[in-house]
Image (cartoon, coloured by chain):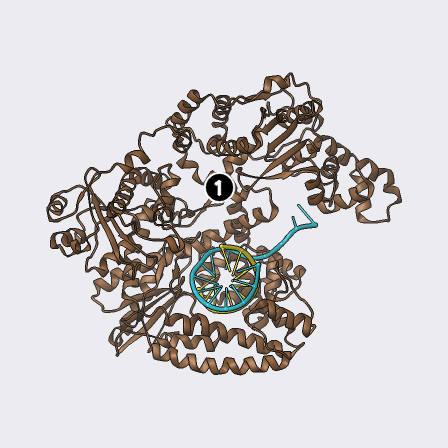
Chain colours: A brown, B yellow, C cyan
DNA sequence: GAAGTCACG
DNA sequence: ACGTACGTGACTTCT
């Protein structure tokens, strides 16, 4: 017996729309030869590949909406009104999607006056009546009302390649109602995106409760008089007409005049020849590869690169050439401060010279060429390359193209330090580091040397191939000066900081290790006594049992896996049992001990210094991050932890540590970009900003009346604003009620109306453009701003508010770092910039230079950029990092 | 490798 | 009605 027939129905409009936003961040990378965008087309096809493989349909249909006017708009004028207009980058792709479906052998259909839903509903019932199985694919959850034993609805989640399958059981499980009752639910709650009302104050939860009790909208109104007097009852009665209208609007027509026969929908697969031509026109290399079509310009040719030996003869050619060269210095191992160089490759785009004999780096001509800033070079990861070469006694200058930096600026999600991954985004195939070297225990350099050299030659070719395209994208985004004047010069500054390193007194750490060890075992014994047994205090699981089962303390918060034992919980239990305080103390000390006192020692090199690695291309906002070890989170807030800073010292006796930090930089940035006059005035007059805020939001006449508690609350509110405020978040942070927090926020926005306007405008900007920007045009794409999920969307909105603030502050200090390094050279100082911690710079310098730095550093920092408010800088110095604060 | 916790701005 | 602050990295436990 042959397998059962299966009909695949796709909601063309909703899936295309989701496909568009799923790949919105790569919009400009997906353009065909005629300048038409292809991102939605590409994502749609990806989805098709997966669905066709999984479903193996015998019949298929893709339904589209016919136009703006439908029987629903005739019923209700405002149906789907007020939607923001569809971007032209999207509409221009719709004909292409139709073409694609045609070549893939799938029937498409639309019907005047009806929406795609109705076509799908009607055909699903026809197919079901003939005993066929049906799968519906859509981005619209409302279609789950069509679910039956024979009909499965797959709704796109997170982009289009993943779906959630709805069967009647799954609907029941998720919502607690039957598929048929979904229209009752929609009738009661309405739909904001389709713009119909429902009953006031009734959302999903209330709607489901009512349906559970009365079965349907009709059932509810039969019994509405019996209901207890309540606001809900009033709303139900007032909005009765709306409920019935909305139910009608939500109902998919399963009997639309569709003139299609099931036989017309038989699916016979791709029209290979036309599809290949189409893919070629769209530059869809990855799909071509999957069809085993040889490509003109990628993998096959890359593998065939002829590499000549890099030796003194070839170096002669390189040195006398005036062409730009691509440079690959391959290191093996994660941390490039210790990793050996395993291969070197230089190419002028035509000839490839490579070797794994590192002694070539002793060649003076090569050394001179590398250091010559008039010899232009392209590479991937400037900072890493400088650091690797430095350990082999070579300097590097003249780099104009760093593919890693450019990729990150174009899209902060391209932040993996892996050229293979970046290449993939441009449809160029190159193995990733993991694919080439393997992972885990299998990770190794290939025994056959020529394989390695060939790999790094491929890297060089990819850099060369993509350079012009990436640089022109950069220009289109107006990001060329961010790259030329900030990120590229910064990569050199950071390399110098990492290479210089900061000196650490290991003896000091050893001393602390002993003290803390004794103290820890003392606390440990006391905790065991109180608990009445020995257990692993570091295990949240075991600790949870002791606190909440043995000692029966009240459970404040739960995690996915059990009881929460985090600080805020323990703080609330402090007065319930003396053991809680000891546990807090134990946690604090043991954190300091393991992460810092013991942890840092592992990173001290033979030169008695720690050489961190700054990740310049990781964060979504433009900040740096620091790893192996992280020197941006050395304790300061509590004194026991702050002691760690006594181990950080200058590299010479008679030198000091000097630190300089921006005061309130993020709020100043906010005052600048929001243009809020009241906040700008506060900074121009150099008021205490938190006290000033307190005075305003508490309606006082002068800052003299501000109590410390008011100032604390105002400070928290200022932070909250920067983070993209929510009343709940603020209430949790300062321990007030949610209502009070809401009042704070409300009066905050009254006092700083410009800030309110900024928050509204930036979210709107993100919705319209798909990204937000800093003052230096650093971009962050926010595809989630269009999410139908409330939480996901809200998170994206807060991010839209926060990123320009945090990111612009990051821009500012980056400029200051570059200018500072120039200043040190110009003034011929011995001082070294060692660390950056987001809003501060830490230097070491001879004592004799401290006074000069005290003048120079603040002036360089506060003039880094010109804002509408002044920047303020505070400095300190001392024998150790501890004292320089 | 995920989850929980906690260090920093 | 929904469930929260923004951005990071490292250590420990446990599956």
Quadrant of the drawing holding the C terminus of chain A: bottom left
Where is residue A405? Give x, y as percent.
34, 49
| Left or right of A23 on screen, residue A737 | right
All told, the count of numbered labels is 1
Say which residue appears at 58% left-offset and 55% top-offset. Answer: A749
Relative height, residue A481 to residue A750 (above, below)? above
| Residue A18 visible from this viewpoint | yes
Q: Nearer the viewer, residue A740 or A433?
A: A433
Q: Which of A733 and A370 is in front in this view?
A: A370
| Residue A675 visible from this viewpoint | no
Q: Which of A48 and A397 is in front in this view?
A: A48
Relative height, residue A464 to residue A557 (above, below)? above
Relative height, residue A77 to residue A433 (above, below)? above
Quadrant of the drawing holding the N terminus of chain A: top right
| Left or right of A225 on screen, residue A837 | left
Disc 1: which residue: A770
Where is residue A459? Give x, y as percent.
29, 44
Where is residue A854? Give x, y as percent.
31, 71
Q: Nearer the viewer, residue A242 or A468?
A: A468
Q: Could you tell me which secondary element the residue under label 1 belongs to?
A: loop
Find the residue positioned furthest to the front. A1
Where is residue A529? Give x, y as percent.
61, 82
């Amino acid at each position: 017996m042959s397998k059962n027939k299966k009909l695949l129905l796709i909601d063309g409009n909703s899936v295309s729309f989701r496909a568009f936003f799923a790949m919105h961040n790569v919009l400009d990378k997906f353009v065909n030869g005629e300048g038409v965008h292809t991102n939605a087309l590409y994502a749609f096809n990806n989805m098709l590949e997966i669905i066709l493989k999984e479903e193996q349909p015998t019949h298929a249909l893709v339904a589209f909406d016919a136009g703006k006017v439908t029987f629903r708009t005739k019923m209700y004028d405002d149906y789907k009104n007020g939607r923001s207009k569809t971007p032209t980058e999207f509409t221009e792709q719709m004909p292409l999607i139709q073409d694609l479906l045609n070549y893939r052998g799938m029937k498409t259909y639309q019907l005047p006056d009806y929406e795609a839903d109705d076509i799908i509903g009607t055909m699903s019932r026809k197919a079901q009546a003939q005993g066929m199985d049906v799968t519906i694919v859509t981005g619209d959850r409302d279609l789950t009302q069509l679910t039956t034993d024979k009909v499965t609805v797959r709704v796109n989640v997170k982009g289009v390649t993943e779906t959630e399958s709805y069967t009647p059981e799954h609907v029941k499980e998720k919502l607690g109602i039957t598929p048929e009752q979904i229209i009752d639910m929609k009738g009661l709650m309405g739909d904001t995106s389709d713009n119909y009302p429902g009953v006031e104050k009734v959302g999903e939860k209330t709607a489901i409760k009512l349906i559970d009790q009365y079965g349907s909208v009709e059932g509810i109104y039969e019994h509405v008089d019996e209901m207890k007097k309540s606001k809900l009852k009033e709303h139900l009665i007032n909005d009765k007409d709306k409920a019935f209208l909305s139910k009608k609007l939500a109902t998919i027509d399963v009997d639309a005049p569709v003139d299609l026969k099931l036989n017309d929908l038989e699916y016979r697969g791709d029209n290979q020849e036309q599809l290949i031509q189409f893919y070629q026109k769209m530059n869809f290399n990855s799909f071509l590869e999957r069809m085993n079509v040889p490509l003109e310009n990628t993998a096959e040719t890359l593998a065939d690169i002829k590499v000549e030996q890099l030796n003194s003869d070839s170096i002669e050619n390189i040195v006398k050439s005036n062409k730009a060269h691509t440079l690959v210095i391959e290191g093996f191992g994660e941390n490039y401060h210790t990793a050996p160089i395993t291969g070197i490759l230089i190419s002028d785009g035509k000839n490839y010279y490579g070797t794994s004999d590192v002694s070539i780096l002793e060649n003076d001509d090569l050394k001179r060429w590398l250091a010559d800033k008039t010899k232009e070079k392209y590479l991937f990861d400037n900072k890493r390359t400088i650091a690797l070469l430095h350990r082999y006694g070579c300097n590097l200058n003249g780099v104009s193209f760093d593919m890693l930096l450019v990729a990150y600026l174009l899209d902060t999600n391209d932040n993996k330090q892996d050229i293979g991954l970046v290449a993939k985004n441009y449809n160029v195939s190159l193995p990733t580091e993991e694919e080439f070297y393997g992972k885990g225990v299998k990770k190794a350099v290939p025994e056959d040397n020529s394989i390695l050299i060939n790999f790094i030659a491929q890297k060089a070719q990819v850099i060369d191939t993509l350079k012009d395209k990436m640089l022109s994208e950069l220009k289109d985004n107006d990001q060329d000066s961010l790259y030329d004047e900030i990120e590229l010069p910064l990569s050199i500054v950071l390399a110098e900081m990492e290479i210089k390193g900061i000196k650490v007194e290991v003896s000091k750490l050893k001393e602390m290790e002993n003290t803390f060890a004794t103290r820890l075992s003392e606390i440990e014994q006391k905790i065991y006594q109180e608990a009445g047994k020995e257990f692993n205090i570091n295990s949240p699981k075991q600790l949870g049992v002791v606190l909440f089962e043995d000692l029966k303390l009240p459970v404040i918060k739960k995690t996915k896996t059990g009881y929460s034992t985090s600080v805020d919980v323990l703080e609330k239990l402090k007065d319930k049992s003396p053991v809680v305080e000891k546990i807090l103390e134990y946690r604090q000390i043991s954190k300091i001990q393991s992460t810092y006192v013991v942890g840092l020692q592992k990173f001290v090199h033979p030169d008695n210094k720690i050489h961190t690695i700054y990740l310049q291309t990781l964060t979504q906002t433009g900040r740096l991050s620091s790893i192996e070890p992280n020197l941006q989170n050395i304790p300061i807030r509590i004194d026991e932890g702050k002691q760690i800073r006594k181990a950080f010292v200058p590299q010479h006796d008679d030198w000091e540590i000097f630190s300089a930090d921006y005061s309130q930089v993020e709020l100043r940035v906010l005052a600048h970009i929001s243009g809020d006059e009241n906040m700008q005035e506060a900074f121009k007059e150099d008021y205490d900003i938190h006290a000033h805020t307190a005075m305003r939001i508490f309606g006082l006449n002068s800052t003299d009346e501000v109590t410390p508690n008011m100032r604390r609350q105002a400070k928290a509110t200022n932070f909250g604003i920067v983070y993209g405020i929510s009343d709940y978040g603020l209430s949790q942070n300062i321990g007030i009620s949610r209502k009070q927090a809401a009042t704070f926020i409300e009066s905050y926005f009254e006092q700083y109306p410009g800030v309110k306007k900024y928050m509204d405008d930036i979210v709107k900007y993100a919705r319209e453009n798909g990204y937000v920007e800093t003052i230096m045009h650093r971009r962050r794409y926010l595809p989630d701003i269009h999410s139908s999920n409330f939480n996901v969307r809200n998170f994206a909105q807060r991010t839209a508010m926060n990123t320009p603030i945090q990111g612009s502050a990051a821009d500012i200090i980056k400029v200051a770092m570059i200018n500072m390094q120039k200043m040190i050279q110009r003034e011929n100082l011995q001082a070294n910039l060692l660390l950056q911690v987001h809003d501060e710079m830490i230097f070491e310098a001879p004592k004799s230079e401290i006074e000069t730095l005290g003048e120079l550093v603040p002036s360089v920092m506060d003039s880094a950029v010109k804002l509408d408010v002044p920047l303020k800088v505070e400095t300190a110095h001392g024998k150790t990092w501890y004292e320089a604060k």
